[in-house]
Image (cartoon, grey):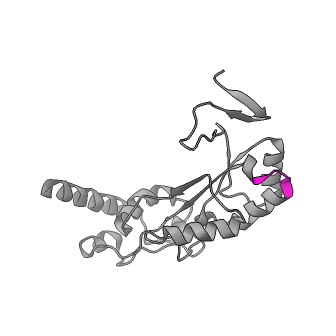
Amino acid sequence: KMFRRLAPFTWLSPASLALATDLAMVGLGTAGIKEVSTIVAAIQMGYRTLDTALIYGNHGMVREAIEESGIQRDELFLTSKVGFFPSSMDLPQEHQAAFGVATLPMPADLPFHPLNVKGKEIEAIELSLKELGVDYLDLCLIHVPATSALELSASFFPHLYHYWPKMPMWTETSVVGALKALAMQEVKTRQSQ
């Protein structure tokens, strides 16, 4: 059989992870969910894969939903993500003019946790486990592979459209300038190798 059905809306493939764990082909991403009842309802409908992240700020809500659902932890495939921000938000001096700032600004309402940075992944995983009330994660991902503020800006700018009114200094011109600066830095790095 190519797939086996375990519960409504939960199709598992025999193509398994190295740990011999089946992974549901459809899961629930919890970013933006505001009500515990939404997650509980999804679990009760048969969802067994839940995706969360430290930056979502909803580990407590996911924990509560798992507890309320009555489904045992070992029946769920729980994913979280850490390491969203680079260790420094300072921009290289040669690129500060393109941005109009020395340090990459972040919207005040973007959830920031001091452990959600590169180099603090182990501590962030431990925090995630504690907040989720579990002993293990089935999968933990590095949320954004950016290691510098410049890389973060290039990967993150396209997703910031809803924050732009709060940050008038991030005009289309500065975005284009920042992306060009990153591209030029990459060219110089590759040429020197």
Rendered image quadrant of residue 66: bottom right
- Residue 170 in magenta? no
Side (left or right) of 184 relative to 51 = left
- Which residue shows up at 43% across the image and 72% down it? 169
Side (left or right) of 73 relative to 119 = right
The magenta segment is: 68-73
Rendered image quadrant of residue 48: top right
- Which residue shows up at 38% across the image and 59% down it? 154
- Which residue shows up at 57% across the image and 32% down it? 15
Side (left or right) of 165 relative to 23 = left
Q: Is residue 117 above or below residue 73?
A: below
Which quadrant holds the N terminus? top right
Most extreme residue toward the left, as rendered? Answer: 192
Most extreme residue toward the front, as rendered? Answer: 19
Q: Nearer the viewer, residue 163 or 31?
A: 31
Most extreme residue toward the top, as rendered? Answer: 1
Q: Is residue 18 above or below residue 174?
A: above
Q: In this figure, what is the number of numbered marks?
A: 0
From this viewpoint, is residue 27 visible? yes
Q: Position of residue 159 (x, y in %)?
A: 51, 56
Q: Position of residue 55 (x, y in %)?
A: 58, 66
Q: Nearer the viewer, residue 115 or 91?
A: 115
From this viewpoint, is residue 166 visible? no
Q: Is residue 82 above or below residue 120?
A: above
Q: Is residue 4 above or below residue 142?
A: above
Which quadrant holds the C terminus? bottom left
